[in-house]
Image (cartoon, grey):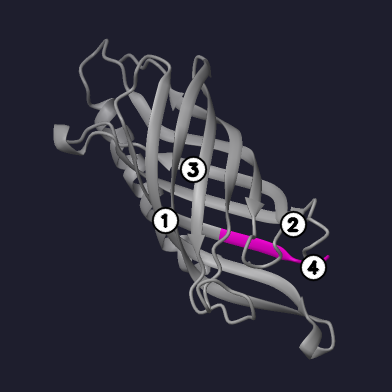
Amino acid sequence: MHLKPYLGLVLALLFLCAADRAFAQAAPAATEAKSPLAIGAGLSGYNFSDYGPGHMLGGTLWIDYSPGQVPQLLRGIGLQIEARDLSFDRSKTLEPNLREDVASGGVFYSWPRFRNIRPYAKYEMGFGNLDYRSGAAGHRRLNQTRTVTSLGGGVELRAYRSLWVRADYEYQFWPDFFFKGAKPIGQLNPQGFTVGVLYHFNRPHFR
């Protein structure tokens, strides 16, 4: 998968993280500074109702950035980078070499935390690649790449200290995907759930 178009997004995320850490270091003594990053991984199950129909399983990686020093109006807004590979436990109704890879980034909004629960919504855009087999091409392995957008949301539950469990739902839009049976014509819309664990790097810091 070609990730070069997203190097700028990764660098911007790292820059914002460094700036936030520098601000925290300048805070008065005996104040708590929190790292804005969270990383995690999960198991995904997606449905391809307009392709097979059928489903596939795969893995997902998350990197979240939640700036701490923002105006009250912007609290709860953050950035997310997400990478997913769906390539095993395919339904028998799907082609044996069908595979989806998506790398995307976007924004999320997390509602105020109620003790140990945190619901959120997200919007992302990224690069998607779908491998498949075409009978019209002599059963050769083909692939299509698209700019994929997605909407979704979910909830996080605190499991232990900085360890949170995440349940995530996502609906994808693959435009101009021309194959017979697509609904609407030319558009592929995989959707599914991911359950995983995130570690939030927030710990006390004293000068």
Q: Secondary structure at mark 4?
A: loop
Q: Secondary structure at mark 2?
A: strand
Residue 34 falls in image quadrant: top left
Task: Give me the C-alpha separation between circle 1 and circle 4.
Answer: 27 Å
User: Label 1: how many residues lie within 10 Å, few (<14), some (14-19) or many (20+)?
Assistant: many
Q: Are marks 3 and 2 in contact (CB under 8 Å)?
A: no
Say what amino acid the circle numbered 1 marks: Glu
Residue under numbered circle 4: 95
Specify the label residue 76 is tagged with.
Answer: none
Task: Give me the C-alpha separation between circle 1 and circle 3.
Answer: 13 Å
Q: Are marks 1 and 2 in contact (CB under 8 Å)?
A: no
Give the mark nearest the N terminus, 2 or 4: 2
Q: Are marks 1 and 4 in contact (CB under 8 Å)?
A: no
Q: Position of residue 153 (x, y in %)?
A: 43, 42
Give the mark nearest the N terminus, 1 or 4: 4
Task: Give me the C-alpha separation between circle 4 and circle 3.
Answer: 31 Å
Residue 30 falls in image quadrant: top left
Say what amino acid the circle numbered 4 marks: Glu
Give 72 or 32, whichever is nearer the viewer: 72
Question: Taking the image as drawn, is residue 2 in sight?
Answer: no
Task: Give me the C-alpha separation between circle 3 and circle 2.
Answer: 21 Å
Residue under numbered circle 3: 63
Comparing labels 2 and 4, the label whose residue is closer to the camera: 4
Residue under numbered circle 2: 87
Magenta region, residue range: 96-102
Comparing labels 1 and 4, the label whose residue is closer to the camera: 4
Magenta stretch encompasses residue 98: yes
User: Label 4: how many residues lie within 10 Å, few (<14), some (14-19) or many (20+)?
Assistant: some
Q: Are marks 2 and 4 in contact (CB under 8 Å)?
A: no
Report the quarter where the N terminus lies: bottom right
Residue under numbered circle 1: 124
